[in-house]
Image (spheres, rainbow, N blue to C red):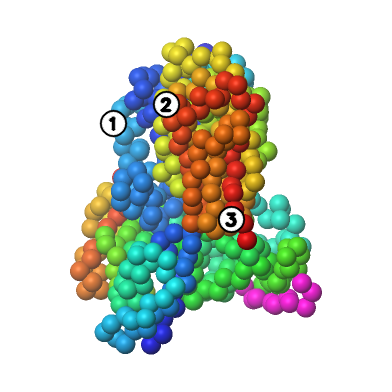
């Protein structure tokens, strides 16, 4: 059987940075597997700018950001195998994959880093009634058509959901000559960045309909139009507010789901609040030696943070291979208090070293709130913020010395405190 | 003339109101920090945008992604897109290669943002 020290599943931003992180820590026996023809993952189709401000202090496009990491991987001579689909991962770290060049293969690894990214929520998960006609796409699928294949999905567009991919596609379709009639958002606020709302919708006079949703999809041979209605506080359509929008294309930008089928095959525990693996502060999952990072662990807002997280996972995977990651310390659970969702990590070792990084998404929009971290009811961090919103992740770095009380602690509590009205 | 805009510097998204007579921005209101005030000033007097787009590559359906090397003036966007859409390039191309010089007299080049072998 083929053997490797560190096997990385996925050659997108997480996989590339994990490989570099492992190499920099000292690893030399690394292998990246990717199912696509080229490395770079979803960044290849994200041709807009705005990537890398934290990492490179300049605004790059997706392909440029990816290429910087691909260049590094190639310069370091880290082996990778593209057009290779992983179909199984076992708890004893044997990976089964298929490719045209090598057929069916089993590869045994000392450590595995899961970097499979996420996929878009499809129409089927929404329960929107109506015809099942062609013309309904997820925003990312349409983005692949326009930016990688040079094809236009349609000319008259409505977008459901105001996530960043939907907003970016509103502008792209406009640039390519289509008319975008509206961006329809169920919630009373958009989960997209303010910059994207201004520069992708406002700049081109595209209305953002908050507290609205698509209630019917019309068209037999092809999409002919959608019915949009206002929703109440219960997010249910208000009868009498329906309005018909003729269109040949409906783009869905309604959320992302980490792609964890392989993770589950390996018997790794999944956290309901992130739909990703349960990890400790070293990004190790419930199966020793299997690590997870990037959008397969939890959906990030910025790729810069994916790269940072993945480098750490890579370095720790090498420490594991070297026998330097001990398993004797107790793991203290991280509890989500008021206003906190999708916390990562879910456990912190009581022997944690260096800096412990916590990331989560606020449940709602909170103004002038405090982010608080408590151990044994003692606040070890209390940070004032002007605004918290579900679209922007909260990223907290805490020095391990501050976590001294962990030995006697039942849990670490992370919560948001809103000012009293 | 009255202007109303949304600040893009942070998730606050302050609604900023201001007057502009073609020379000077006055009566700026609604911002909560210095960045917001500065944003209103430039966004009203000289709004600019980075433009990212696609050009055709000879002999393949897959387009090449490009960007303006620097932001261009907002009213130039659609004129620039027309020029970009009519452009065809020949591979090999590398990131940073100039695809269109001085687009629409803006003084800004359009450059490749991906490699094509």
In the rendered image, which quarter is residue A106 located in? top right
Disc 2 is placed on an element classified as loop
The residue that disc 2 covers is A354
The residue at 44%/59% (across/down) is B10
Disc 3 is placed on an element classified as loop
- Chain letter belonging to callout 3: A
Q: CA distance from mark 2 to mark 1?
A: 29 Å
Taking depth in this image into account, of A335 and A151 the one nearest to the observer is A335
The residue at 66%/63% (across/down) is A186
The crowd level at tag 1 (other Cα within 10 Å; few <14, some 14-19, many 20+) is few
In the rendered image, which quarter is residue B45 located in? bottom left
Q: Which segment did they paint magenta?
A: A238-252
In the depicted structure, whether residue A391 falls above or below residue B109: above
The residue at 52%/56% (across/down) is A368
The residue that disc 3 covers is A419
Give the foreground label among 3 and 2. 3
């Amino acid at each position: 059987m083929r053997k490797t020290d560190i096997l990385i599943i996925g050659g997108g931003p997480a996989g590339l940075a994990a490989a570099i992180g492992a190499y920099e820590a000292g690893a030399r026996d690394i292998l990246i597997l990717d199912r696509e023809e080229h490395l770079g993952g979803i960044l290849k189709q994200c041709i807009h700018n705005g990537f890398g401000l934290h990492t490179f202090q300049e605004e790059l496009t997706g392909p440029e950001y990816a290429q910087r990491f691909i260049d590094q991987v190639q310069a370091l001579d880290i082996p990778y195998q593209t057009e290779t689909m992983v179909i199984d991962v076992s708890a004893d770290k044997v990976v089964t994959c298929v490719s045209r060049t090598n057929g069916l293969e089993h590869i045994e690894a000392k450590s595995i880093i899961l970097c499979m990214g996420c996929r878009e929520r499809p129409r089927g998960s929404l329960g929107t009634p109506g015809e099942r006609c062609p013309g309904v796409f997820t925003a990312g699928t349409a983005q692949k058509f326009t930016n990688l294949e040079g094809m236009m999905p349609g000319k008259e567009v409505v977008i459901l959901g105001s996530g960043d991919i939907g907003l970016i596609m509103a502008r792209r379709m406009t640039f390519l000559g289509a008319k975008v009639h509206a961006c329809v958002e169920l919630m009373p606020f958009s989960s997209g960045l303010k910059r994207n709302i201004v520069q992708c919708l406002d700049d081109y006079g595209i209305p953002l309909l908050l507290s609205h949703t698509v209630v019917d999809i019309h068209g037999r041979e092809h999409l002919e139009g959608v019915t949009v209605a206002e929703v109440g506080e219960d997010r249910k359509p208000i009868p009498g507010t329906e309005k018909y929008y003729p269109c040949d294309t409906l783009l869905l930008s309604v959320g992302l789901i980490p792609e964890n089928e392989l993770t589950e095959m390996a018997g790794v525990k999944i956290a309901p609040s992130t739909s990703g693996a349960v990890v400790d502060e070293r990004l190790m999952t419930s199966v020793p030696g299997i690590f997870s990072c990037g959008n397969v662990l939890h959906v990030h807002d910025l790729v810069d943070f994916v790269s940072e997280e993945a480098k750490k996972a890579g370095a720790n995977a090498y420490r594991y291979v070297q026998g330097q990651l001990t398993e004797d310390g107790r793991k203290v659970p991280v509890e989500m208090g008021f206003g906190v969702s999708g916390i990562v990590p879910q456990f912190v070792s009581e022997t944690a070293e260096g800096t412990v990084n916590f990331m989560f998404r606020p449940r709602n929009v909170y103004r002038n709130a405090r982010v608080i971290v408590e151990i044994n009811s003692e606040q070890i961090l209390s940070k004032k913020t002007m605004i918290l919103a579900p679209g922007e992740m909260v990223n907290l770095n805490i020095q391990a010395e501050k976590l001294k009380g962990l030995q006697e602690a039942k849990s670490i509590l992370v919560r948001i405190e809103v000012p009293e009205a | 003339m009255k202007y109303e805009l949304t600040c893009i510097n942070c998730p606050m998204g302050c609604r900023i109101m201001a007057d502009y007579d073609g020379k000077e921005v006055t009566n700026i209101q609604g911002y909560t920090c210095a960045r917001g005030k500065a944003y209103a000033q430039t966004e009203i007097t000289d709004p600019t945008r980075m433009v990212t787009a696609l050009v055709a590559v000879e002999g393949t359906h897959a387009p090449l992604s490009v960007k303006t090397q620097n932001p261009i003036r907002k009213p130039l966007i659609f004129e620039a897109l027309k020029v970009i859409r009519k452009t065809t390039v020949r591979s090999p191309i590398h990131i940073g290669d100039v695809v269109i010089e001085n687009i629409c007299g803006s003084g800004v080049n359009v450059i490749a943002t991906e490699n094509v072998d």
